Image (cartoon, rainbow, N blue to C red):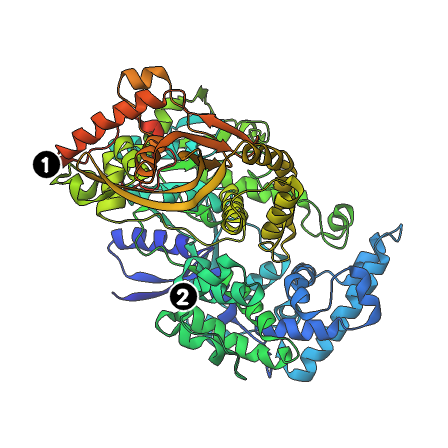
């Protein structure tokens, strides 16, 4: 394609792409297209100076701020902390420069001397910084308004320039283009919005996530009306909601204009795992480290050589760019330990993004990215107070009153600019759908009423939107389809828990015992009730391994305390839980001594027993078996809830838990078993199963049924309540 010698300038790259498509349809020589920012960089010259990069800028500013009084601005000079805050200073100084306002002018309007100290400090910072720039031969963008010259050769390469304005222009930009207009013909074009006949829908929701259903429903409606996908956009007050939308984008309709955070990349996750491991050796951090890194970390003199072997296959342009820039900073970080430098490098990577290269044709973009573009249909979720438009809490360094008097943009003006962005994108669309959250924390944006839109707020259908959100899962895999296989229970060892799994859900049994797919767990230092229960079980095992009976409750308590305290390992939280159990054990020890005085004695603990019963191989490990008068008494320790059975379950044959009945058959291979019961350790009570005999009889029926099985349909359970906490719920498509 031939290019004409005209130049068209737009606010954003997205606006250029839209304009390019329009020019292509006109079947003419294509003009040169550029963003305003890119053009400005080429159109100006500063002789004998080099433009300063962002990192060097930060370093010089820190040096410029290194004087005692600077601490009054409450911006720490410590390097890592300074890097988090230095942009506030530049933002203010850049703003003054772009509006041709001297710092001294601020003093004229500060008649009550409220900000005199801030102003004096900023004057000194700027003087120091400019002096350092001059010494090093750099030019900073804050000095451009006063030092620039036009690159006339470049400007004269165009016959005419079209400038499309759809936002705020600083006085510097006005001056720049005024000078350019004296060299080449310049036409400023401000877009006039002609509102089409609009169809506007507004809905409120009590749950933010349901708005995603609203979005998907509206997209479906727009596509059905014949609107092309590329002419539909989701406009967000804040981009974080875009990631939520993509999580439910099963159809791959959406693309994120702002991309994914770089922190989601494998390279970043590996470095973050290393950082977390070196910061704190928790179980979870150790697990994450070993997942990505096989050998022990060794720090080297060269920062990047210390870890690059772990990420060699994951490097990309983003990493290489940040590495190149960071190398320039390293000489200034020599006094910092490796961990701090890694933290700083990770922080830089986290601010980068990855393109959504696999996304669909419907664009998700922030409101700031809508400058210069229009869509036939738009959907705006989260149209709530404080975000639409986003509220700016306060101005930096000086008050809004002084900003207004000297001609700086105020909070109110910046809010108006945001509102104009919304108006432009809304008023150009034929189809508009807006939603907001209405609950105790969120209110509809008052700006919605200011827009003077002709709409009615509709009440949402909670059930409809839930179905839309959670019924759009991908088609089930073969694993979720019918699974019928030959199976012989006589060939396996059957425990009570294995039987319970089979009776609860045959598909769960298939995944766990046939496919041997186990629940993935991440080691954690968090103390769970199960952890405490295991410690209590271990302590009882150790105490009764050494002595089968006690006649002094204090002796028994001291033994339990000794065993439990050995497991604390200076963990304060664990000690708290152990001490709670030791209080409960006061009563437990009294009950135990009474039992031993009545003639009971611990016969076996943690006893693993196997037996063939009714043609099946039963197995189990029994917590404790007591003996009295040559008869056995099975006890199963419980630190949590005791399983309960109701009469109706027995009558209908729906019992699933036969633990005590299993233990009865197993212990009976040793001696005559008189009783099997739960030992509730929290209350120190022995609790019997009141339907023990009925369940014992029912177990025989169940086992006989298993023995006769030759083939099993490993179907999904009909009781969906049991799916709530099942680790295989997603594999079965029951997670909705």
Specify whether residue 474 is in view. Answer: no
Q: Classify mark 1: residues with Cα within 10 Å, few (<14), some (14-19) or many (20+).
A: few
Q: Report the residue at 52% width, 75% height from top.
A: 325
Total residue callouts? 2
Q: Which residue is mark 2?
A: 292
Dot 1 lies on which element? Answer: loop
Residue lying at the far right of the rendered structure: 112
Q: Few, some or many C-alpha atoms within 10 Å of disc 2 (few <14, some 14-19, many ≥20)? A: some
Q: Position of residue 653 (x, y in %)?
A: 26, 20
Evaluate whether residue 521 shows in this view: yes
Say whether residue 131 is left or right of residue 205: right
Q: Is residue 86 above or below residue 192?
A: below
> Which residue occupies the foreground of this view, 384 or 210?
210
User: In the rendering, at what x and y percent does residue 610 appear?
Assistant: 28, 44
Measured in 3D between alpha carbons, the distance from the residue under mark 2 to the one under mark 1, in whole angstroms, is 44 Å
Secondary structure beneath label 2: helix
What residue is drawn where x is 71% and y is 50%?
395
Tell me where residue 157 sits by quadrant: bottom left
Position of the C terminus by quadrant: top left
Mark closest to the chain's N terminus, 2 or 1: 2
Placement of 292 over or under 437, stated as above or below: below
* Residue sitting at x 24%, y 55%: 27
Residue 143 position, x and y percent, is 66, 70
Q: Which residue is mark 1?
A: 710
Say which of 499 and 160 sits in front. Answer: 499
């Amino acid at each position: 394609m031939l290019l004409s010698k005209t130049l068209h300038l737009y606010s954003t790259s997205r606006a250029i792409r839209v304009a390019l498509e329009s020019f292509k349809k006109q079947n003419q020589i294509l003009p040169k297209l550029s963003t305003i920012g890119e053009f400005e960089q080429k159109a100006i010259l500063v002789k004998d100076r080099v433009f300063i990069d962002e990192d060097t800028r930060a370093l010089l500013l820190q040096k410029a701020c290194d004087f005692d009084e600077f601490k009054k601005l409450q911006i720490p000079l410590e390097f890592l902390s300074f890097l988090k805050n230095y942009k506030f200073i530049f933002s203010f100084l850049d703003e003054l420069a772009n509006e041709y306002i001297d710092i001294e002018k601020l003093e004229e309007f500060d008649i009550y001397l409220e900000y005199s100290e801030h102003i004096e400090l900023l004057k000194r910072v700027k003087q120091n910084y400019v002096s350092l720039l001059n010494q090093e031969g750099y030019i900073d963008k804050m000095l451009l308004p006063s030092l620039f010259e036009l690159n006339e050769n470049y400007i004269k390469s165009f016959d005419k320039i079209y400038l499309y304005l759809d936002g705020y222009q600083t006085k510097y930009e006005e001056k720049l283009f005024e000078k350019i207009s004296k060299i080449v013909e310049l036409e400023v074009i401000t877009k006039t919005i002609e509102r089409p006949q609009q169809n506007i829908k507004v809905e409120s929701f009590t749950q933010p996530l349901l708005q995603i259903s609203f979005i998907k429903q509206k997209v479906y409606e727009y596509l059905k009306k014949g609107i092309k996908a590329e002419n539909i956009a989701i406009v967000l007050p804040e981009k974080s909601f875009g990631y939520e939308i993509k999580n439910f984008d099963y159809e791959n309709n959406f693309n994120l204009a702002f991309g994914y955070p770089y922190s989601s990349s494998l390279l970043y996750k590996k470095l973050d795992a290393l950082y977390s491991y070196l910061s704190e050796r928790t179980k979870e951090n150790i697990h994450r480290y070993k997942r990505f890194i096989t050998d022990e970390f060794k720090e080297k003199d060269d920062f990047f050589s210390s870890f690059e072997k772990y990420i060699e296959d994951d490097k990309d342009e983003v990493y290489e760019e940040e590495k190149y820039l960071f190398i320039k900073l390293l000489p200034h970080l020599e006094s910092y330990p490796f961990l701090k430098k890694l933290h700083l490098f990770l922080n830089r990577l986290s601010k980068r993004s990855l393109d959504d290269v696999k996304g669909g044709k419907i664009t998700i973009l922030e409101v700031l990215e809508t400058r210069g573009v229009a869509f036939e249909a738009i959907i705006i979720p989260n149209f709530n107070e404080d975000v639409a438009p986003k509220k700016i809490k306060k101005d930096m360094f000086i008050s809004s009153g002084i900003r207004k008097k000297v001609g700086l943009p105020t909070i109110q003006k910046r809010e108006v600019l945001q509102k104009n962005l919304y108006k432009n994108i809304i008023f150009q669309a034929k189809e508009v759908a807006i939603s907001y959250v209405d609950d105790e924390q969120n209110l509809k944006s008052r700006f919605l009423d200011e827009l003077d839109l002709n709409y009615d707020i509709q009440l949402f259908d909670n059930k409809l939107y839930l179905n839309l959100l959670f019924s759009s899962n991908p088609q089930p895999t073969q694993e979720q389809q019918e699974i019928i296989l030959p199976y012989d229970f006589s060939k396996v060892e059957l425990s009570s828990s294995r039987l319970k799994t089979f009776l609860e859900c045959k598909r769960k049994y298939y995944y766990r015992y046939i496919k041997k797919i186990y629940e993935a767990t991440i080691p954690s230092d968090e103390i769970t009730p199960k952890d405490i229960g295991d410690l209590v079980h271990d302590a009882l095992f150790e105490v009764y391994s050494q002595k089968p009976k006690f006649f002094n409750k204090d002796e028994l308590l001291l033994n339990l305390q000794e065993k439990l305290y050995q497991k604390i390992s200076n963990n304060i939280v664990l000690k708290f839980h152990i001490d709670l159990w030791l209080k409960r054990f006061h009563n437990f020890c009294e009950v135990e001594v009474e039992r031993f005085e009545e003639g009971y004695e611990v016969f076996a603990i943690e006893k693993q027993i196997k037996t063939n019963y009714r043609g099946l191989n039963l197995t189990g490990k029994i917590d404790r078996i007591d003996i009295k008068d040559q008869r056995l008494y099975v006890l199963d320790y419980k630190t949590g809830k005791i399983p309960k059975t109701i009469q109706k379950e027995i009558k209908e044959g729906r019992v699933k838990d036969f633990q005590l009945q299993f233990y009865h058959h197993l212990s009976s291979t040793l001696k005559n078993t008189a009783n099997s019961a739960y030992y509730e350790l929290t209350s120190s009570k022995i609790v019997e199963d009141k339907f023990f005999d009925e369940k014992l009889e029912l177990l025989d029926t169940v086992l006989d049924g298993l023995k006769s099985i030759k083939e099993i349909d490993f179907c999904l359970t009909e009781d969906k309540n049991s799916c709530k906490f099942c680790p295989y719920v997603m594999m079965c498509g029951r997670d909705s």
